[in-house]
Amino acid sequence: MQRPAVAAVVSEYSRRSHGDVIVTKLLEGYALHGVRTDPRIGVASLYFDKLTANDIGRHLAGRHGVPVFDSIGEALAVGGRGVAVDGVLLIAEFGRYPFNELGQELYPRRRFFEAALAAMVAAGRPVPVFVDKHLSWSFADARWMVAAARRLGVPLLAGSSLPLTWRVPAIAWPLGVEVSEALVIGWDGLEGYGFHALEALQCMVERRTGGERGVQTVECLEGEAVWQAGAEGRWDCALLDAALAAVGLDPAIRPEREAPRPAAILIQYRDGLRATVLMLDGVVSQFAFAANRAGRIEACEFHLQLDEPFGHFTFLVRQIESLVLTGQPPYPVERTLLTTGILDAAMRSRHQGHTEIETPELEISYDPPKVVQDCGGGAPLPWRTAQA
């Protein structure tokens, strides 16, 4: 039987870009839990928004016989008419795009989505869509995208690979846990990698009693104000110690001294949960989560394979395949709508002098999935398995 196939719409397809670590796996296969695995869907067409000197997309397309088109509509039609694919991947993460006054990189995720949606409406054929990372730099655009997909019957999945990657130790919370406070540590830029940290946070705290009901306020802090907030009890220093221990940081190395540009996102959820994202570039190079669960601190590393083959993206590819094969997102797009909104509010807070932002627009409710198949949670790290 012929496999279902997708149109891949990519901002830039250079080596190690998100186009490479996602689409190349669909072209050439991947290792799932150490086992060589053929992809369950194919790539019918490609569109590149920017062609650079280090582009590898055209070479790979030629090698695998995949046509490249000059417009998104043509890619969905595969050179014919209508919509001739079974799904669409929108991967706008690499490539040079302008920044706005808030420091948000203006990746064309809504533009990509609108072009794909226009082709579907014209053809009268909605197909599933995956949007890599946050839905948009703008929460207003993200909310429009989710509403349009729902209105037109387009199954929509979005988000980071972080919720799917390995956890060390392999914490897997059931639904309905009691959580009073949570904290995530990460590194690199506030917008690009802060989104990953928010997704790691959200995939855990959404499992608390009552499910997700949204966020009331967001505040961004930077520099010494981050540590002052900890000293004042606005975030729990014991959770930071647990998160640092989860990534194996030497206790003698203190981020208060070593992090040159610390940043924090303070989040107050509508049900009373308090959460913090700490970006500690220069101190850590992995993500970790810690929480006060029913009076006891639990922590784990969200481990990324930071070199080829970037195995955590294999788990994301499996979710994309599931979306296309079943027409059902394996977890709610509202999770990424919420993390997109928190990040947008944090960037606005920073731009407005690190003020607390009221977020009535983030009264977003959803129920988390009971379980997500084919992910790293509970699975051993493949390189440790090989050594055993």
Image (cartoon, grey):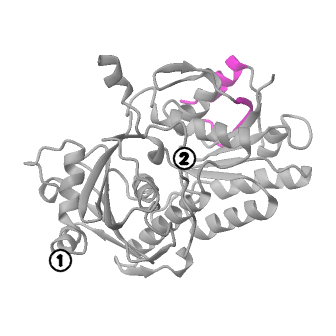
The residues tagged by marks 1 and 2 sit, at their Cα atoms, a distance apart of 37 Å
Q: SS class of the residue under badge 1?
A: loop
* Rendered image quadrant of residue 151: bottom right
Residue 251 lies, with reference to residue 225, above or below; the image says: above
Q: Residue at x 34, y 22 (%)?
A: 385
Please give the residue where the numbered disc 2 appears in the rendered image. Answer: 93
Q: Position of residue 347 (x, y in %)?
A: 43, 68
Residue sitting nearer the eye, 49 or 27: 27
Task: Give, as a single range, the part of the protein colored magenta.
Answer: 41-64
Q: Position of residue 248 (x, y in %)?
A: 19, 41
Q: Amino acid at mark 2?
A: Glu
Residues packed near mark 1 inside 10 Å, few (<14), some (14 to 19) or many (20 plus):
few
Q: Amino acid at mark 1?
A: Glu
Q: Position of residue 187 (x, y in %)?
A: 32, 50
In the picture, measured across the screen, residue 39 lies left or right of residue 237, that is right
Residue sitting nearer the eye, 22 or 63: 22
Q: Earlier in the sequence, mark 1 or mark 2?
A: 2
In the picture, measured across the screen, residue 70 lies left or right of residue 276, that is right
Residue mark closest to the camera, 1 vs 2: 1
Please give the residue where the numbered disc 1 appears in the rendered image. Answer: 232
* Rendered image quadrant of residue 239: bottom left
* Rendered image quadrant of residue 51: top right
Q: Is residue 281 magenta?
A: no
In the picture, measured across the screen, residue 166 lies left or right of residue 229, that is right
Q: Are marks 1 and 2 in contact (CB under 8 Å)?
A: no
Q: Position of residue 121 (x, y in %)?
A: 87, 55
Q: Residue at x 52, y 62 (%)?
A: 340
Q: SS class of the residue under badge 2?
A: loop
